[in-house]
Image (spheres, rainbow, N blue to C red):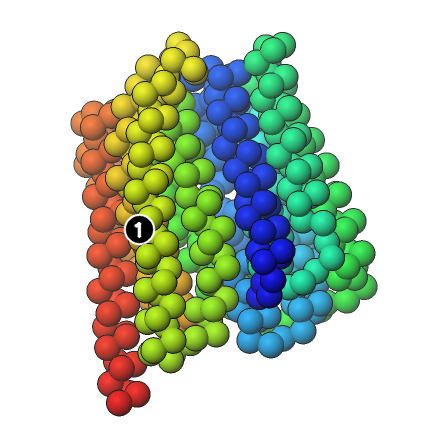
């Protein structure tokens, strides 16, 4: 766990760079590609989301858990990084099959490049954030995040200044992810000797499936609105909603940086009622302040987002304005979910995420075809309100049982 203010500052700076890489760059991509082509990208990313956790098999959660519980950090990190690179080709192959089923042979090469860029960048960035928050590694995380953020941002700027086609953008996106992964692997291997150590144990595979299944469920219910939208409306509609949804996701990155620091502490608190309750109260206080700030920020951004993006994005302002409600609901979900995991009930958290996928499908199929704006906004708000209710109910039942056992 982070032990100094300097280390915590580096964590926040790394998340700030991620904010640029995943936020500003996609805003530029939307402007450069136009609503129609950007809609194709959003549709592909919605397919890749639920697949991506199986590429690292829950590495973020397992690194945080194992190091917090006292396992050798070098062995834990080496095992998990090796897992990512071994499963990456399998993930890309499965992504191609899914793209073929969704789009046929049209744009299959584009799907390949988007899959390479997304899976390499998202999985390695996530794993490195876990290493950074649980170890005192000498790996230059800020430099590595800078490589990703700068390359992605430059790609967006290049697209706006020179004009760019979807296939050209996809190729450059894949190259950006490849450069980031190679540079990261060099530094990680130098620190953790990944290529020399780390046999992957059967237990690691079993635990990884549990964690990755939960993450896959989470990606599924978060992206189900975009999948249904893509099946119901033309790509331009998906693009207009997709950039608003992307901004909403990026709005959760700063609070995610804070939660990443507290997550190992929930693991350490375990089934200790007083420690878990006290920790949760502190986190929820931060959540409340952040919810107020981010709601105002998102509303202000919604006032001019369509003017900046231009033709094809006329509805993005309306989408973004009302997405501030689901953002707040998600801000409050995560602390309760992390507390449940800390109590040793990741199985319950996974079950909630699985039920949420079913709820997302049922709500989305009914509401989204009715109206491309109102339907999707009502469906996503109802879904996240339901998920928060699930977590609240389960947490209070578990904490009540813990309190009785400690009395």
Q: Can residue 123 be seen in this view?
A: no
Q: Which residue occupies the foreground of this view, 291 or 365?
A: 291
Can residue 303 be seen here?
yes
The 10 Å Cα crowd at callout 1, few under 14, some 14 to 19, many 20 or more, is few
Residue 159 position, x and y percent, is 59, 16
Q: Residue at x 23, y 77 (%)?
A: 400
Q: Residue furthest bottom?
A: 407
Is residue 363 left or right of 300 when viewed as pictured? left
Viewer-closest of 189 and 216: 189
Q: Which of 332 and 358 is in front in this view?
A: 332
The reply, left or right, for residue 183 in relation to residue 80 is right
The quarter holding residue 4 reads: bottom right
Residue, disc 1: 288
Q: Quadrant of residue 345 in the image?
A: bottom left
| Residue at 71%, 67% in the rendered image | 74
- Check the image and report above or below for 49 versus 321: below
Tally the numbered discs: 1
Quadrant of the rendering where the N terminus is positioned: bottom right
Q: Residue 153, how many percent across, how many down?
A: 60, 27
Name which residue lies at 31% across and 34% down: 296
The structure residue drawn at horizontal position 49% and vertical position 40%, both measured from the top left corner, is: 48
Query: Which percent across, then down, holds residue 282?
Result: 36, 62
| Quadrant of the drawing holding the C terminus | bottom left
Q: Is residue 2 above or below residue 154?
A: below
Mark 1 secondary-structure assignment: helix
């Amino acid at each position: 766990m982070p032990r100094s203010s300097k280390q915590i500052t580096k964590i926040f700076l790394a998340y700030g760079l991620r904010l640029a890489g995943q936020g500003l760059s996609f805003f530029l991509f939307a402007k450069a590609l136009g609503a129609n082509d950007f809609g194709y990208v959003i549709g592909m990313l919605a397919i890749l989301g639920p697949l991506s956790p199986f590429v690292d098999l829950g590495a973020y959660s397992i690194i945080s858990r194992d190091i917090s519980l006292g396992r050798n950090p070098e062995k834990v990190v080496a095992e998990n990084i090796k897992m990512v690179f071994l499963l990456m080709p399998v993930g890309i192959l499965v992504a191609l099959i899914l793209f073929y089923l969704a789009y046929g042979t049209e744009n299959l090469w584009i799907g390949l490049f988007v899959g390479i860029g997304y899976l390499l960048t998202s999985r390695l960035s996530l794993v490195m954030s876990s290493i950074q928050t649980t170890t005192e590694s000498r790996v230059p995380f800020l430099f590595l995040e800078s490589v990703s953020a700068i390359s992605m941002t430059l790609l967006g700027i290049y697209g706006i200044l020179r004009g760019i086609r979807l296939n050209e953008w996809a190729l450059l996106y894949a190259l950006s992810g490849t450069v980031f992964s190679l540079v990261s692997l060099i530094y990680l291997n130098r620190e953790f000797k990944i290529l020399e150590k780390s046999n992957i144990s059967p237990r690691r595979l079993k635990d990884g499936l549990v964690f990755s299944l939960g993450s896959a469920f989470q990606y599924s219910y978060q992206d189900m609105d975009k999948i249904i939208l893509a099946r119901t409306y033309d790509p331009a509609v998906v693009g207009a909603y997709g950039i608003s949804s992307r901004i909403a996701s990026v709005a959760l990155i700063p609070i995610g940086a804070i939660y990443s620091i507290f997550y190992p502490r929930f693991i350490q608190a375990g089934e200790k009622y007083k420690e878990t309750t006290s920790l949760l109260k502190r986190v929820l206080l931060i959540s409340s302040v952040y919810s107020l700030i981010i709601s105002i920020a998102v509303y202000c951004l919604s006032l001019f987002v369509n003017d900046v993006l231009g033709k094809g994005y006329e509805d993005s302002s309306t989408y973004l304005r009302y997405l501030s409600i689901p953002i707040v609901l998600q801000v409050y979900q995560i602390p309760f979910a992390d507390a449940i995991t800390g109590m040793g009930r990741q199985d319950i958290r996974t079950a909630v995420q699985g039920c949420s996928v079913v709820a997302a499908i049922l709500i989305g199929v009914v509401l989204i075809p009715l109206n491309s704006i109102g339907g999707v906004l009502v469906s996503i708000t109802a879904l996240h309100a339901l998920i928060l209710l699930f977590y609240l109910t389960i947490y209070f039942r578990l904490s009540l049982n813990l309190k009785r056992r400690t009395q």
